Image (tube, rainbow, N blue to C red):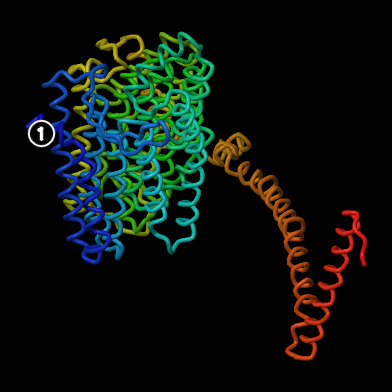
């Protein structure tokens, strides 16, 4: 069975792709049938993913010795374009995470989207979304990865703009699509440079070629390629300065947010850096840059999350911050810690978004946390899951985030004290804003005009399953030797640094305490604090005015440049073409004037032409005779 799973691993992305092909044209009008098809196909993907992961253990497949099946899809000049399936522990891990989270979100969506007329269309889009991500993680080359990378981007556009009758949803979809295209352009240039330099985009071939190239030619070009590839990761994973689309992505259905923020789109950027780690690790400059961007993004987004009033807005900036942790870890060389945090984050963040969806479902799509309150009595299961999620993301033992985040903090402490200090303070902010969210939304008195209620079984069970995974995955990963399985090629068992663990836990508890004093006991009057720190609060609340800055650039520079090009197009190029057209018309008027249908005029032109030809012939005859020395007569 293991051999069959490995040799047929290409079916894993094919199952949800088939669901898309069935639902889109045929069954989207039948809600229940569409949901059943999507859930069944994703269940098959999960089963195959589990067997593939087990096969990596059974057959000794490692990061240095992957299982690869590929074929040449096309040849462009001397460049072979390969497609296939690439199985190593990193791929196996991602296949399980993506398929498991997707399946739970699908089951949840069967109830959440039940009253929406576009439910069939939703399941078609979300199936294609999961298929694209599963295809991406199993790619054998940068070319194949880029094809599915763009598929993920397309699906995010379709799902964020799912409620296309809403202007805000349409604008959010365009914003996400255009913003990520900026990063994707840099990534594409990097892939083209690799293809030109080395004659291949195949991961295994590049892994063998690049170390020798660096020894002979240095790291200059590798650094350039690394930074270009990282542009793609910045866009997809919402890193500064291309983070602005992630908050607007909340316009899509909440299950979409759960998938985007947990297991698909934003995880793609981190996966790219992990898959191309053999390139990034050759450039010290690139690694420093990744660390810097990750560290700043983690702190920057956490600051913004402290002031947000929308439930999903807090979670969105939480995602950006946690992705910053992952990027920082990869940049520091803590490959296993970064991937471990990707796994733990996928489960607790999916659960947190599903909890947000349950609350919105119960309160008629209300998102303002200050219009909630007292939900713990009316939604005890959702409250229970939220508590687990808050404890996990804050790094409280023994929940999953404790093990993965503390590994990152330990790596930061060993590599750079400034990075460690910033990331530890970010951990404090994380616990503060998550406890703030929990207290305002669930404790105190109700401020909602609607009567909240617990969700049905289809929405409860996925939340409970994710809660269980949030509790056990960290323990299983740490004691089960995750770092021995998924690593950068060197298997080293990561052990807890007790100093870092104690400091991190203490900082998180301090954040809880401060949030409780301010929002639970209300010992500090918020209006007074906002008045005292009004300028700082406004700057952070408006997300440091990055969106406004981009809007200014768009209006002042992009529009000005566009107007200038429009003037050149109309008055110069358009003028030239208009002049050529006028010349053609004038010439045609002159030439067409004789063709008026009068026979006598045609005869006149005919005889005139004959006379001209005769005179010319006579003239040239005389010239020839004179030049030959002859005499006429």
Return the x and y of residue 573 as percentages of the image width and height. Answer: 73, 56
Q: Is residue 101 left or right of residue 1?
A: right
Please tell me whether residue 516 is drawn above or below residue 378 in the rendered image.
above
Q: Is residue 399 above or below residue 281?
A: below
Outermost residue, left direction? 1
Q: Is residue 27 above or below residue 19?
A: below
Corner quadrant of residue 56: top left
- Residue 319 image point, x, y percent: 40, 35
What residue did someone put label 1 on?
4
The quarter in which the C terminus is drawn is bottom right
Of residues 221 and 480, the one nearer the viewer is: 221
Give the secondary structure at mark 1.
helix
Q: Quadrant of the N terminus?
A: top left
Left or right? Give the position of 479 relative to 551: left
Residue toward you, 464 or 414? 414
Please provide percent x and percent y for residue 227.
50, 25
Residue at the front extreme of this rendering: 633
Count all numbered tags in the image, as a single digit: 1
Asked whether, in this view, residue 505 is left or right of residue 539, the answer is left
Of residue 339 and residue 58, the one placed in the foreground of this image is 58
* In this picture, residue 479 sits left or right of residue 577: left
Residue beneath the point at 88% across and 66% down:
619
Is residue 421 visible to us here? no
Which quadrant of the structure image shows residue 77?
top left
**Residue found at x 47% / y 18%:** 287
Q: Nearer the viewer, residue 516 or 192?
A: 192
Q: Position of residue 445 (x, y in %)?
A: 36, 48
Q: Is residue 420 above or below residue 159?
A: above
Q: Is residue 210 visible?
A: yes
Q: What crowding class fits label 1: few (fewer than 14 Cα within 10 Å), some (14-19), or many (20 or more)?
A: few
């Amino acid at each position: 069975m293991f051999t069959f799973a490995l040799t047929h691993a290409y079916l894993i992305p094919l199952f949800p792709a088939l669901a898309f092909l069935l639902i889109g044209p045929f069954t989207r009008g039948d809600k229940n049938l569409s949901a059943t098809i999507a859930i069944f196909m994703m269940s098959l993907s999960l089963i195959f993913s589990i067997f593939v992961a087990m096969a990596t253990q059974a057959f000794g497949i490692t990061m240095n010795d992957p299982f690869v099946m590929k074929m040449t899809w096309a040849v462009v000049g001397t460049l072979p374009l390969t497609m296939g399936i690439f199985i190593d522990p990193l791929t196996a891990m991602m296949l399980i995470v993506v398929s498991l989270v997707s399946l739970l979100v699908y089951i949840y969506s069967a109830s959440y989207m039940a009253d929406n007329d576009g439910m069939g269309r939703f399941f078609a889009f979300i199936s294609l979304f999961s298929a694209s991500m599963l295809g991406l993680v199993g790619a054998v080359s940068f070319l194949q990865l880029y094809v599915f990378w763009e598929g993920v981007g397309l699906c995010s556009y379709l799902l964020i703009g799912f409620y296309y009758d809403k202007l805000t949803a349409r604008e959010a979809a365009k914003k996400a699509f255009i913003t990520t295209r900026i990063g994707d352009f840099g990534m594409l240039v990097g892939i083209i440079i690799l293809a030109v330099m080395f004659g291949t985009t195949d991961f295994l071939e590049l892994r063998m070629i690049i170390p020798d190239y660096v020894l002979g030619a240095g790291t200059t070009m590798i650094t350039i390629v690394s930074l270009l590839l990282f542009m793609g990761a910045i866009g997809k994973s919402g890193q500064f300065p291309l983070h602005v689309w992630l908050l607007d992505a909340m316009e899509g259905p909440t299950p979409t947010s759960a998938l985007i923020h947990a297991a698909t789109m934003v995880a793609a950027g981190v996966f790219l850096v992990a898959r191309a780690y053999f390139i990034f690790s050759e450039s010290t400059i690139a690694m420093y840059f990744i660390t810097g961007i990750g560290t700043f993004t983690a702190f920057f987004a956490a600051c913004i999350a402290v002031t947000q009033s929308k439930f999903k807005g807090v979670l969105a900036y939480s995602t950006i911050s946690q992705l910053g942790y992952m990027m920082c870890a990869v940049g520091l060389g803590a490959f296993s810690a970064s991937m471990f945090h990707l796994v733990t984050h996928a489960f607790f963040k999916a659960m947190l978004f599903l909890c947000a969806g349950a609350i919105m479902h119960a309160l008629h799509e209300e998102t303002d946390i200050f219009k909630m309150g007292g939900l713990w009595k009316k939604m005890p299961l959702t409250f229970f899951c939220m508590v687990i999620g808050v404890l996990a993301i804050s790094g409280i033992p023994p929940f999953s985030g404790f093990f993965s985040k503390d590994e990152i903090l330990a790596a930061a402490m060993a590599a750079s004290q400034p990075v460690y200090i910033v990331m530890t303070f970010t951990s404090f902010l994380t616990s503060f804003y998550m406890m703030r969210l929990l207290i305002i939304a669930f404790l105190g008195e109700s401020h909602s005009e609607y009567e909240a209620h617990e969700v049905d079984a289809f929405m409860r069970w996925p939340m409970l399953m994710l809660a269980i995974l949030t509790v056990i995955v960290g323990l299983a990963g740490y004691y089960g030797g995750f770092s021995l399985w998924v690593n950068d090629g060197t298997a080293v068992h990561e052990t807890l640094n007790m100093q870092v663990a104690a400091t991190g836990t203490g900082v998180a508890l301090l954040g809880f305490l401060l949030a409780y004093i301010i929002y639970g006991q209300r010992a500090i009057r918020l209006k007074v604090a906002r008045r005292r720190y009004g300028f700082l609060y406004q700057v952070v609340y408006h997300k440091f005015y990055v969106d406004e800055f981009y809007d200014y650039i768009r209006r002042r520079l992009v529009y000005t440049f566009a107007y200038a090009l429009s003037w050149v197009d109309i008055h110069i190029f358009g003028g030239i073409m208009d002049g050529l057209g006028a010349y053609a018309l004038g010439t045609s008027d002159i030439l067409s004037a004789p063709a008026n249908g009068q026979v006598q005029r045609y005869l006149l032109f005919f005889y005139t032409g004959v006379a001209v030809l005769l005179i010319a012939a006579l003239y040239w005859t005389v010239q020839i005779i004179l030049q030959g020395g002859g005499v006429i007569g």
